[in-house]
Image: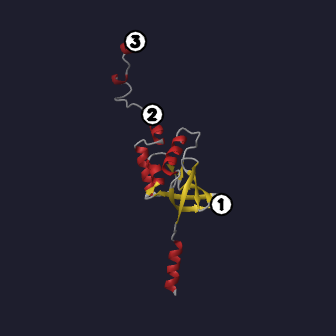
Amino acid sequence: MKKIFVLFLMLSTLSFSEVVKAKVVAVYGGDSFQVLIGNKKKNVKLYGITAPSQKETWGPKSKESLSLLLLNKNVSLEIKSQNSIGMSAIVYVGNENVNMKMINSGNVKFIGKDSKFNEAQNKAKKNGKGLWAEKKEKEVKKPKVKGNKNSKENEFDMNDKKERN
């Protein structure tokens, strides 16, 4: 009896994600959309993801990317959480993980704790993909100055200065 109780406790702590089939009928932004499950419409948010709003620079591009991947397509939703407003899910079109695809392309930010999604985001940042390209362009690198401040290498050439004026 004790073994059965321990087994029950172990199984009850595992999290099982419910998988639901649906059809995408609308895309609201780069991280949210509406599906039809049976005859009911439900709102879905990509699990662990946030996208720029439509008013932000990359917002329309993020929405367009998600629309191309999902709109009018049949999807599988691996539901991570849900409430009366909607659900959060990892989304698949066939075997393709849409959450991962959006992160890889730099169209969204991953804000969760899943290591594979974090790794994908770090790679997108490093490669300046999507919204990370804008941030990479804004990085200003200070030139390295050789020698000390009294060194000739740091002095302006007066002739060079006169030519610019």
Q: Inspect the image, locate mark 3, and give the three-letter code of the amino acid beneath it.
A: Lys
Work out whether residue 43 or residue 149 is closer to the camera in this orientation and state it: 43
- Residue 59, compared with residue 14, is above or below; it is above
Judging depth in this view, the residue of 96 and 142 nearest the camera is: 96
Picture coordinates of residue 131, whole percent (x, y): 48, 41
Q: Identify which residue is drawn at 56% across, 39% down.
A: 56
Q: Residue at x 52, y 79 (%)?
A: 8
> Marks 2 and 3: which is nearer the front?
2
Q: Secondary structure at mark 1?
A: loop
Q: Residues within 10 Å of mark 1 (few under 14, many from 20)?
A: few
Q: Residues within 10 Å of mark 2 (few under 14, many from 20)?
A: few
Task: Give the residue at mark 1.
Answer: 84
- For residue 164, side relative to residue 82 (left or right): left
Marks 3 and 1 sit apart, C-alpha to C-alpha, by 71 Å
Which residue is labeled 2 in the image? Answer: 140
The residue type indicated by label 1 comes to Ser
Secondary structure at badge 2 equals: loop
Q: Which label number is shown at residue 5?
A: none
